[in-house]
Image (cartoon, rainbow, N blue to C red):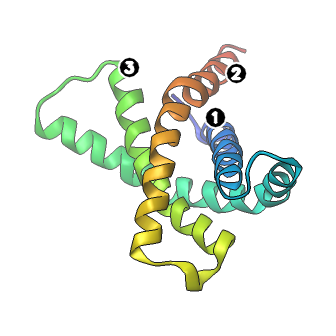
Amino acid sequence: MPNNLKEELIFTGLMAGMMVFGMTFYNVTLQNGLNGHAVLTTVTGFPFALIVAALIDLLIIGPFAKQLFFSTVKRFNFEPKGIHIGLGISILMVLGMVTCMSLFGLIMGKGIASVSMSNYWHAWQLNVIVALPLQLIVVGPFARAILSRIQTN
């Protein structure tokens, strides 16, 4: 886990960057199929989505997820090991980010007029079933490996 602001920014950049790219590509492909348009739309939409996701992560979801995790651990007198901390916070982060970024994706993809509870719930479900494994199996371990190399140098 990050030990200072520099490491936090690098770690967040890696996590948010890979998750935003993966989830944007997934959502664009769901809407338009797998073609050149999907790749182009993903690449052109990526910078703005990354900025939005990083800000939401750093300012809202990250602090909230960590506070929720550690207050729950404290309430139940549980002494988490490193893997428990990483998994617990990652799951809470994914749930929070999917909640926020599904709304962002609906607005950016179809416009504010298309946002309904039904559309949002459908988007949320489709996103969470891909975001959790992407985070837990691919992005999280990769970002932690990069961070550990930075910390040892």
Q: Nearer the viewer, mark 2 or mark 3?
A: 3
Q: Which residue is mark 3?
A: 83
Taking the view exactly as shown, the residue that stands out farthest to the left is 76
Q: Nearer the viewer, residue 39 or 147?
A: 39
Q: Residue at x 61, y 60 (%)?
A: 55
Badge 3 amino acid = Ile
Q: Position of residue 71 (x, y in %)?
A: 22, 44
Q: Position of residue 112 (x, y in %)?
A: 59, 82
Above or below, 15 relative to 108: above
SS at circle 1? helix
Task: Determine the CA span between mark 3 and mark 1.
Answer: 19 Å
Q: Which mark is residue 7?
A: 1
Query: N-terminal of the two: label 1 or label 2?
Result: 1
Q: Which mark is residue 31?
A: none
Query: N-terminal of the two: label 2 or label 3?
Result: 3
Left/right placement of residue 78 relative to residue 143 reads left
Above or below, 45 relative to 6: below
Cβ atoms at labels 1 and 2 below 8 Å apart:
yes
Q: Which residue is mark 2?
A: 150
SS at circle 2? helix
- Would you call the spot at circle 1 few (<14 residues within 10 Å), some (14-19), or many (20 or more)? some
Badge 2 amino acid = Ile
Residue 106 appears in the figure: yes
Q: Residue at x 20, y 42 (%)?
A: 72
Q: Residue at x 12, y 40 (%)?
A: 75
- Would you call the spot at circle 2 few (<14 residues within 10 Å), some (14-19), or many (20 or more)? few
Q: Nearer the viewer, residue 125 or 72?
A: 125
Q: Position of residue 19 (x, y in %)?
A: 63, 42
Q: Position of residue 125 (x, y in %)?
A: 42, 52
Q: Residue at x 56, y 80 (%)?
A: 114
